[in-house]
Image: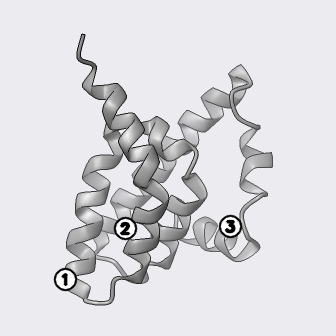
Amino acid sequence: MFAPQILIDADLQAIMKQWCISLIMLKDPKEKESAFRGFCAVLPISIKAVTNNFPFLCSCFSKYKQPPADLEQQFGRILSEFKQYLIAQSATGAVPRWELYIKTFPETLRQDLAQRF
């Protein structure tokens, strides 16, 4: 039996960290915006893929200074959805409590996320 969701989860997990790092490195504004829009379109396909790389996702969003307003709002929605997912998972013991988990992020990243989202 073919299970495409399992393949997508595995593939996204394998490339998520490098994808985030690559997005941070983009310089051209139009290319950066287009790349982030495509990235955001793929994220809802697999929450599992992002769970292990959530700090990289947060850093990726944080380092994109002055994105278009609609893209900034999309970042906020995505982060909120992942936060809710992680909170639900922490209730089952699958991941640490949100408060403990977010404390593992660098202070500057936590501050930027709190201010922007």
For marks 3 and 2, give the CA distance: 17 Å
Q: Residues within 10 Å of mark 2 (few under 14, many from 20)?
A: some
Q: Position of residue 88 (x, y in %)?
A: 61, 28
Q: Position of residue 85 (x, y in %)?
A: 54, 34
Residue 72 marker: 2
Q: Residue at x 70, y 34 (%)?
A: 95
In the image, residue 23 above or below residue 57: below
For marks 3 and 1, give the CA distance: 27 Å
* Amino acid tagged 1: Lys
Q: Residue at x 69, y 27 (%)?
A: 94
**102 and 7: which one is in front?**
7
Per the image, label 3 sits on a secondary structure element best described as helix
Per the image, label 1 sits on a secondary structure element best described as helix
* Amino acid tagged 2: Glu
**18 and 27: which one is in front?**
18
What residue would you read off at disc 3?
Answer: 110
* Tag in front: 3 or 1: 1
Tell me the colour scheme of the image.
one colour
